[in-house]
Amino acid sequence: MVRVRYAPSPTGTLHIGGARTALFNYLFARHHHGRFILRVEDTDQARLVEGSEESMMRGLKSLGLVWDEGPDVGGDYGPYHQSERLARHKAALQQLLDAGQAYRCYCTPEELAEERARQEALKQPPRYSGKCRMRPQDDPIHTSGKPFVVRMKVPEEGTTVVQDLIRGPVTFENRILGDFVLAKSDGTPVYNFAVVLDDYDMAITHVIRGEEHLSNTPKQILVYQALNLDLPAFAHVPMILAPDHTKLSKRHGATSVEEYRQQGILPEALTNYLLLLGWSAPDDTEIMTLEQAAQWFDLDRVQHTAAIYDIKKLEWMNSQYLRLLPVDRIKEAVTPFLAAEGIVPESGPDLDTVIALVRERARTLVELAQGMAYFYVRPQTFEAKGVQKHFDATTPERLRALAEVLSQLSTWDHDSLMAAYDAEAARLEVKRAALIHPSRLAVTGRTVGPGLFELLEVLGQKETVDRLLETATAIENGHITPTP
RNA sequence: GACCCCAUGGUCUAGAGGCCUAGGACAUCACCCUUUCAAGGUGGUAACCCGGGUUCGAAUCCCGGUGGGGUCGCCA
């Protein structure tokens, strides 16, 4: 039974790198009919951020990544908070101490910082000197009450090999690892130690995580070996880098799942986009559901190279989902954005109809909402370049004539509207377009949008006529200045 | 700096020695369609980091260089 986990530290929000790692874990589990587990690595109480755990869970859920076991849903391998597994960590720590595979180190942070500075000055690799490693059992310091950390007694010779499922064997010299810390002076375990026990106790079969963990893996393997525990399989997925090729950070704009949501990216689209960062389907399919992806997904098609995310393609992906998803889903997603535009849906045409009309011209929910706005709110401004191009001295007269004709219409649909415009154009001996463009601008305030007749059909007869007249008046009163 | 990973167009990628005149997608440019915009259609610009090997043959294998990234914490 395949068991994988995503193990975030609750120190912020879910960012796209973590989301992608979670996604790969999820798909791997689904593909192999295994279990996807969420574990919260909250041992460092000092770094905890209030609400972060909830926010991350919300983020994962929004992306469709549901876990089979976790802090909220429980499971047979709990607890799923690392902080609640302390007793187990301490017992294992004692075991290593007793076996002489770990030792107490009384060096102070200041001494260590000094040591590091010295090593760096000498251009030597910064590594713990092992000063406390050789202290005899009866060294009085052991009973002095002096604070200590516990360090791993790393073999001075030999190599440790990480058998990485994506990269193959990766060899590290043990001597360059240094005697790393297993537990802090307050007795709490450090990541490289706790993670080993947690993964083992939770029967994790595959540790799939970001590449930044590759260098830490030999340390963890040493712990597995010292404790005589079977190793899981390891797979390190490439990182996601910002457009400037550096590690993701706040200064790169939107990096969190939440921020993309606020920018009007559908979670469905974000998930699909993230999937393509470092993985590709055997037949190059790009748009696919999680279910489809799970059928195909495996580690052998995961890229070795870090990927740079591209907002343009994300937005394209989003535009695809905007037209693919059921109207109800779009409606649900766009609702908060409608509110932000000051739109009260009850005040205008049916939302489904409007969405159907506008969805394929929007890349984000923000654009969608903006494109929907004039159906519910009369335009307050008119695009300057449109006014220049489509309004002139004859416009008010023509708009009034149009309003008159349209108000006479007994049938209000696309075809009758078109016929009315054709008749009016013929009467004036102008092209139909010469009426269409000013009308669109007069009614919506914009030069772009759905086909005019579809638009007017949805907007309704009375509202259309009113707006035509209102704009004519506005021009006459000088509120809008047409091109002479 | 040491160690580790990586290297196909601007970006995401296909490619597991001959199928490659290097394929797809986003972006970009042009044209078509057209009541605008978008969509769609057609076409174009654009890549195997460099140098050595191995081989009849290398984007694919090996070595070196260069470049990028990661890790070196009483963070995870």
Image: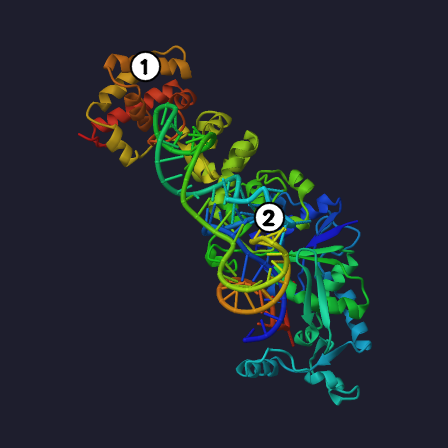
10 Å neighbourhood of mark 2: few (<14), some, or many (≥20)?
many
Describe residue B41's horizontal placement relative to residue A466 as left or right.
right
Instruction: Residue type at mark 2: give it.
Output: Gly
| Residue position marked by numbered label 1 in the rendering | A422
Residue A214, position as x, y percentages in the image: 65, 63
Out of A273 and A102, give the one closest to the viewer: A273
The quadrant of the image that shows the C terminus of chain A is top left
Out of A97 and A168, give the one closest to the viewer: A168
Residue A165 against residue A460 in the figure, above or below:
below
Say if labels 1 and 2 share a chain: yes
Q: Secondary structure at mark 1?
A: helix
Residue A176, position as x, y percentages in the image: 66, 75
Instruction: Residue type at mark 1: give it.
Output: Asp
| Residue position marked by numbered label 2 in the rendering | A59
Q: Chain of mark 1?
A: A
Residue B71, position as x, y percentages in the image: 60, 67
Residue A254, position as x, y percentages in the image: 49, 52
Does the image show residue A89?
yes
Residue A369 against residue A303 in the figure, above or below:
above
